[in-house]
Image (cartoon, rainbow, N blue to C red):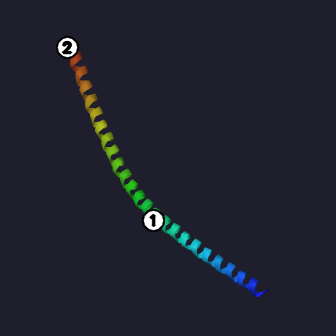
Amino acid sequence: MTPEEINRTIEFILQMQARNEVTQEQHKETLRGHDEMLQQMAVQGKLIAELIVIESRRIDEVQQENQAAHMRFEAWEKRHEHWEKRDED
């Protein structure tokens, strides 16, 4: 190899190393961004789980209230039927 070819080869190698360093930095930044997103997703997942628990309790409460209202209605309906029979007699 001539000294000129050696210099071009060295220059090429140095340019490739510089590009690789830039690419590595870009990858590091991307990974940092992904880490932040994963942390946010974990927090959101926890909040969603808490919300599910709260809403599940609310649904249970509403079902209990509906059941109690249904029982009151059935009791009223029986009393009403009883009064109607008394009036017919």
Farthest residue, direction front: 4
Residue at (25% x, 32% y) in the render: 72
Q: Using a 10 Å C-alpha cutoff, classify the residue at mark 2 as few (fewer than 14 neighbours), some (14 to 19) or many (20 or more).
A: few
Q: Nearer the viewer, residue 17 or 73?
A: 17
Q: Nearer the viewer, residue 13 or 6?
A: 6
Residue at (35% x, 47% y) in the render: 55
Give SS at disc 2: helix
Disc 1 or 2, which lies upstream in sequence? 1
The residue singled out by tag 1 in the image is 36
Farthest residue, direction top: 88
Q: Position of residue 49 (x, y in %)?
A: 40, 55
Farthest residue, direction right: 1
Q: CA distance from mark 1 to mark 2?
A: 75 Å
Q: Position of residue 47 (x, y in %)?
A: 38, 56
Q: Is residue 50 above or below residue 34?
A: above
Residue at (42% x, 57% y) in the render: 45
Q: Position of residue 2 (x, y in %)?
A: 78, 86
Task: Indicate the quadrant where residue 40 lies.
Answer: bottom left
Query: Which is in the foreground here, disc 1 or disc 2?
Result: 1
Q: Which disc number belongs to residue 87?
A: 2
Task: Indicate the quadrant where residue 17 lies.
Answer: bottom right
Q: Nearer the viewer, residue 19 or 24?
A: 19
Residue at (65% x, 80% y) in the render: 14
Q: Position of residue 61 (x, y in %)?
A: 30, 44
Residue 89 seen by the camera = no
Residue 77 seen by the camera = yes
Quadrant occupied by the C terminus: top left
Three-letter code, disc 1: Glu
Q: Please state if 71 lies on the left or on the right of 8 as rendered.
A: left
Q: Nearer the viewer, residue 69 or 41?
A: 41
